[in-house]
Structure formats: structure tokens, C-alpha cells
Amino acid sequence: MSGQLKEVRERITSVKSTQQITKAMKMVSAAKLRKAQDAIVEMRPYADRLDHMLKNILSNLDGDASSSFGTVREVNKVCVVVMTSDRGLCGGFNSNIIKQLAALADKYKVQREAGNLTIMFLGKKGFDFCKRSYADCNLIDEHVNLFSDLTFENISEIANGLMDRFKSGEFDHVDVCYTKFRNPAVQFAMATQFLPVAPVVVDEKADDKSDTKADYIFEPSKQELLEHLIPTILQTTFQKFLLDTNASQHGARMTAMDKATENAEDLLKDLKINYNKARQEAITKELSEIVGGAAALAG
């Protein structure tokens, strides 16, 4: 019986230690989340409006101006950018993004078989998981540590590289797998088209005319303005993807650690009940032995 009690005591000590760790990780994630959440909440309306304006501009281009970023080509060479976290312990955050990548890999099966599917990883977990499963693809891991230094300069460097490769014809299509942040408990993994820029599609029957094409007046010349404006807007859009993913990973980790802390508390309650039962049984057994021995001596 003493061995059983010792085993339960050791388990209680172990669970308490784990609970302290998960509690600390929850607090760290909560602190990081506040900063990351403020960044994406402040930026999203601006980035969404710029993205809408970009699609509107490219939808209204006529013969006197053009942009290679809106050119739709036959899809032979594809690049998929996968944004995951550097660390685990964040629930299904990374696996949900990997599912989006798997869906795209199935969509671009022909390009993959031809060796024309390139996957760029931003975040270590995505690369660690996919380096074997997608060994037949062209894997780019030079930016896996981006989330440790998430500055606009570093983000712009990657976005500009993708735009240059698309412009040169190295890629015909660029998709991004990221996680859209809603709140600490809810995030949505999704895949979206980055290049070429999808034009605005106007629904004439819809009551909401927010997607109605606008007629812009350009100053200076349309072509000169587009050469500077479009890359800047695309950089901002790419930054929004990363800020969304960054806030989502901290929210997912905080939620996961909070749940783990609650589970540890429930487990501790059960272990304490088992410990008290075993201790009571041991005491009862000892008392029975004492009473039995005393009765034997008296007899």
C-alpha cells in the first residue's frame, strides 16, 4: 500500500510541475498576443482598403497602361508560401495550415509531378513537417526564422523577391497559406492568391455595390504611378498575412496552454481523491491489524 501511495504522490508532484509550466507559457503568450493583436487590428482596415484599391485599379487598366502583376498566364510554375509558427504547443494551429498546403498540392498535382511546384516556408514548424512529405518539390527554407525578426524591411525583401520572380516568369502563380486572426480563441487557416492580383468581379444583381469598379484619375502618368504604387500595396498585403499569422499563433498557444492548465487542475483533483482513498484504506488496515492483535492477546 505504501508503494501505491508513493506512486500517487509522485504523480501529483509531476502534474503540479507541469501545471506551473503551462501557466507560465500562457502568461508569456498573453503578453505577446496583446502586442501582436494590436498590430493586426490597427493595420487590417488599411491593408484591406489598399488591396481593394489595387484590384480596382488593375480592373480598370486600358490600353495606355499595364501591369505585369495583374497578368494572368498559363499556370506552369507555382509557388506556395506557407506561414507557420517556429514552436509547437499551439493546438491545431500548424496542422490546419498544413491541411491548406495539402489541398493546394493536390490542386497543382500536374505542376508537382513536373517538378514545377515550389514551396517557401516562413516558420520552422512547416518546414520540419514538410521536408520529407514534399521532398519532390522545390523547398525554400532561407526565411524560416522570419517570425523572430518580423520587421517591414524583412517582409518587404521577401515580398519583392516573389514579385520579381513572378515578373520574370519564374513563377506563373503565387499562393499564400496563412491564418486569419479573429480573436484569441478563433483563427481561420486559409489559402489565398497573391499573384497575379485577382481583378474585382462586379455582381450587378448584388445590393452591396462596394465592389463596383472605380474610375481613378492618375497624377503623374498612370504607368509611372503604377510602377511604384502596386509593389507597395502588395508589400502591405503580404505584411498583413504575416501579422495575421503572428497574432493567430500567440492566440492559439495561449488558448492551448489555458486548456492544458485546466486539464492539469482536473487531473490533480482526481489524483488527490485517489491518494486520500488509498491513505484511508492503509489507515483502516493498520487499525484492523492492531485491534485484531489486541483481541488475540486478550483471548
Image (cartoon, rainbow, N blue to C red):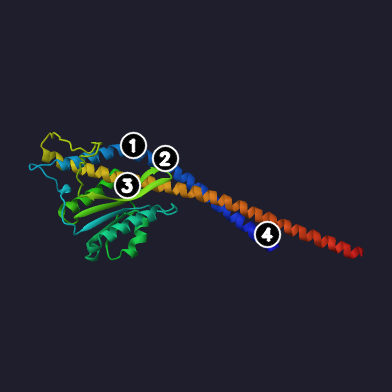
Which numbered disc covers residue 116?
none
User: Which badge, 4 or 2, is on the more N-terminal residue?
Assistant: 4
Question: What quarter of the picture does the N terminus occupy?
Answer: bottom right
Characterize the local packing of mark 4: few (<14), some (14-19) or many (20 or more) Cα atoms within 10 angstroms.
some
Which one is in front, 294 or 14? 294
Which one is in front, 201 or 294? 201
Which one is in front, 108 or 232? 108
Gap in Å between the C-alphas at discs 4 and 3? 51 Å
In percent of the image, x 83 and y 61: which residue is there?
A: 290
**Label 4 belongs to which residue?**
5
Q: Secondary structure at mark 1?
A: helix
User: Which badge, 4 or 1, is on the more N-terminal residue?
Assistant: 4
In percent of the image, x 24 and y 66: which residue is there?
A: 113
User: Which badge, 1 or 3, is on the more N-terminal residue?
Assistant: 1
Characterize the local packing of mark 1: few (<14), some (14-19) or many (20 or more) Cα atoms within 10 angstroms.
few
User: Which badge, 2 or 3, is on the more N-terminal residue?
Assistant: 2
- Amino acid type, mark 2: Arg
Residue 139 visible here: no
**Label 2 belongs to which residue?**
34
Q: Secondary structure at mark 3?
A: helix
**Label 1 belongs to which residue?**
42
Q: Secondary structure at mark 2?
A: helix
**Label 3 belongs to which residue?**
242
- Amino acid type, mark 3: Leu
Q: In the image, 8: left or right of 29?
A: right
Question: What quarter of the picture does the C terminus occupy?
Answer: bottom right
In percent of the image, x 53 and y 49: which residue is there?
A: 261
Characterize the local packing of mark 2: few (<14), some (14-19) or many (20 or more) Cα atoms within 10 angstroms.
some
Relative vertical location of residue 42 with respect to residue 256 in this rendering, above or below: above
